Image: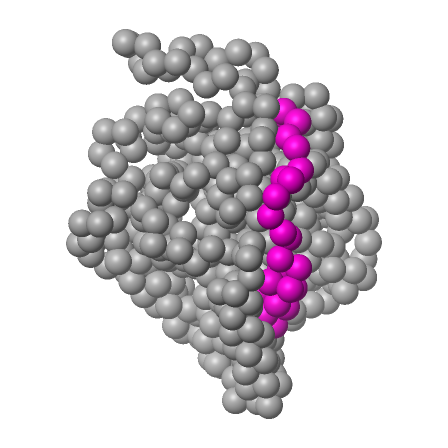
Amino acid sequence: MTSTTPRVIPAPASSPASGIQPWTTRTWLLLLVVCIVIALDGLDVSMVGVALPAIGTELSLETGTLQWMVSAYVLGYGSLLLLGGRLADLLGRRRILLIALAVFAAASLAGGLVSDPAIVIASRFVKGIAAAFTAPAAFSLITTNFAEGPSRNRAISIFTTFAASGFSLGLIVGGLMTSLSWRWTFLFSVPFAVTALVLGLFFIPRDRVAKTGGHDVWGALTLAVGMLTLVYTVVSAPDVGWSSAQTIIGLVAAAVVLAAFAMIELRVRHPLIRFGILREGFVARANISAIALFGSYVSFQFILTIYLQSVLGWPPLSMALALLPAGLVVVATAPFADRLIDRFGSRLLITVALGALSLGYLLFLRVGTDPLYVVDILPSVLLLGAGFALGFPAIQERATAGISNDEQGLAAGLVQSSSQVGAALVLAVTTALIAGGEHTADAGAAQMLDAFRPGLVLSTAVALAGFAVALAPVRRGARRR
């Protein structure tokens, strides 16, 4: 395997009181840069989700086309995350992060200024590609500059607080921005991305390009093409039909290309993905948990946003305020995630988190066409906030614990790829279920709710499946590792 040699910021040594000595100013500024980066990734997904009805009205887009505002982002993100993580390990985390961050800022600016739906969707796709490189690079900067143990757990806790808070508070910011114009949900990220880029030039330690190890060009190419084909086919299936020739050919083509990728990885000297990493620690379980968390949550948010605004007529700001408690729970709980992980272990936190999400979805299934917020919606909102606050950092820690430095980018990219691809696939199936119902612009609230209910059931089922996996006994060999 390859190895990069970053200029490691001295990790705080242990102290009798807290186990961590105070960090230097430079340490905090490095952490600030990567926290801004990961918060922007989360903000971008949830902000645009809130703005979907406004975008559809101004650009005259149907619900099926609106899905691409979300799917284009996760399509670029999920299909290239593993490549992004591997290139960060090989070419240097600093270089990859700064270049991708500049692309992210440019695409955000372009998406907020144009009116052509195709260009807007294309800008979302480009932003997803950029995020596929910034996210694993940012996380691997944490895991390679902070010693494993209390110091790294504290840094990961702060990092994931920004990530989870960005995703949750993006709903609130999205409501505020959409009340001005949906374009501000695109433009909002630009000044923060530029700020992180400037700070990164000064405070991210320089690292060297790996002198050994290949870049596995054919592996990267087949993985990207295979994932793009798979996600594109599943996302397009609701429009062209699951039994159509296009869908069948697309699924077969994706399977063939991904099989070719697997064969390449088993034979190439320096593989893009070492499949054995799935047997190390709890990597496989963590990735399944990530699929359950993000797959259920993104699909639920898509349905909730369209239903509350388009069917019940709630303005964006009212919907944002209704979801504010979830963001507050995340902000209040996530900073203590490292202490909770140290005390209770990541497995218990993941189990509790997926259980809370499942219960929240189950409670929401009883919502009718004239919901009472405090009784019908607020309990689910609070449970979703608690589930995300506990589950997100615990999954990240569990996915990378015990992994060597030269594969931290791969492990980080793998779990984030699982999150995004899981979100894309579950959202695509959710959209197909919704499209199967009979609902038109003239349909009443009850008819629309009936059409959305199968999608809500799917989100619940995905979360329950993840909860069941989290409860399953752990093999002794994995526990020892």
Q: How is the image coloured?
A: one colour
For the point 72% across and 26% down, the residue is 201
- 236 or 207, which is in the foreground? 207
For the point 20% across and 56% down, the residue is 472
Residue 238 falls in which quadrant of the image?
bottom right
- 387 or 207, which is in the foreground? 207
The answer to whether residue 469 shows anywhere in this view is yes
Using the image, determine if residue 443 lies above or below residue 84. Answer: below
For the point 47% across and 33% down, the residue is 143
For residue 253, side relative to residue 109 (left or right): left
For residue 234, side relative to residue 357 (left or right): right
Q: Position of residue 1 (x, y in %)?
A: 51, 47
Q: Position of residue 346 (x, y in %)?
A: 29, 40
- 33 or 361, which is in the foreground? 33
Using the image, determine if residue 159 lies above or below residue 216. Answer: above
Q: Position of residue 136 (x, y in %)?
A: 55, 43
**Is residue 213 shown in magenta?**
yes
Q: Find the magenta span and give its range.
A: 204-230
For residue 412, side relative to residue 80 (left or right): left
Using the image, determine if residue 26 lies above or below residue 251. Answer: above
**Is residue 150 shown in magenta?**
no
Where, quadrant-wise, is the C terminus in this rendering?
A: top left
